[in-house]
Amino acid sequence: MKLLEGKTALITGASRGIGRAVALKFAENGANVAFTFLSSIEKGKALEAELAAFGIKAKGYQSDAADFKAADELINAVLADFTTIDAVVNNAGITRDGLLMRMSEENFDEVVRTNLKSVFNITKAVQRPMLKQRSGSIINMSSVVGVKGNAGQANYAASKAGILGFSKSVALELGSRNIRCNSIAPGFIETEMTDVLDAKTVQGWRDAIPLKRGGHVNDVANLAVFLASDMSAYITGQTINVCGGMLT
């Protein structure tokens, strides 16, 4: 039996990178997958078809998780199409890097709204059906930057650190109803975003990691599968670093 067979999962920000890898891994493990994308309808339809090829039900929704009303409407739409939501992966996120002295209020607010408020919006909306069914796994995508900080990313670090405190609080509030909430903190994960960086710089980052490599999106996706599955039934309120030992 596949780890997520019979479950329905919602993944936000799934059009590329880690979110896309999570969606594919969930489908591969038997989950029906609902996912969101923000702009490219074409990419959303392509991913929908790719996921459906695993023999599961898949549907993409163009939705902004950072919009409170849109998040509530999204959860209602997913429930109408799939009946239940067993797992949520709050993955939507952006960066607007810059030193604090040059960081605009707009760049700070935009990152906090997209990265942190979106987690609040989706979690608040999905708790109702999860409370009713007395089960659920909420997985929030943070970052090692939220654990240790990083120069030039005060806004991003604040948003990702906020996710850690939020997740622990949700775990304490909803644990008695068998609803779990955990955070994943990826380290240096090589995606299409890192492909455009200077090769020497990237290699320097790899060399500083104990495992001597950057992470793959599937390194994160595999953990998300575990946390969404019944194999992690006694794990909640935790932050798990996927960083190759970077924070050791």
Image: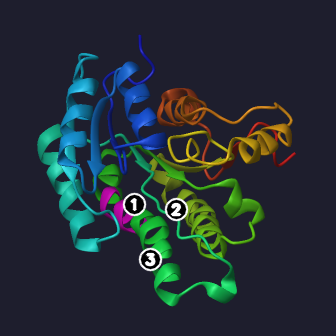
Q: Which corner quadrant of the image does residue 240 belong to? A: top right
Circle 2 SS class: helix
Q: Is residue 158 left or right of residue 151?
A: left
Marks 1 and 2, how far apart at CA:
9 Å
Compared to residue 126, the image places residue 180 above or below, namely above
Compared to residue 245, the image places residue 127 above or below, namely below
- Check contact, mark 1 vs mark 2: CB within 8 A: yes
The residue beneath circle 3 is 110
How packed mark 2 is, by other alpha carbons closer than 10 Å (few <14, some 14-19, many 20 or more), is: many
The residue beneath circle 1 is 123
The residue beneath circle 2 is 170
Compared to residue 114, the image places residue 139 above or below, namely above
128 or 211: which is nearer to us? 211
Marks 2 and 3, how far apart at CA:
23 Å
Q: What is the three-letter code of the residue carrying label 1?
A: Thr
Which SS does the magenta portion mostly show? helix
Mark nearer the N terminus (2 vs 3): 3
Give the tally of numbered discs.
3
Mark nearer the N terminus (1 vs 2): 1
> Residue 69: horizontal and vertical position, in percent?
22, 72
> Residue 12: horizontal and vertical position, in percent?
36, 50
Magenta extent: 120-126
Marks 1 and 3, how far apart at CA:
19 Å
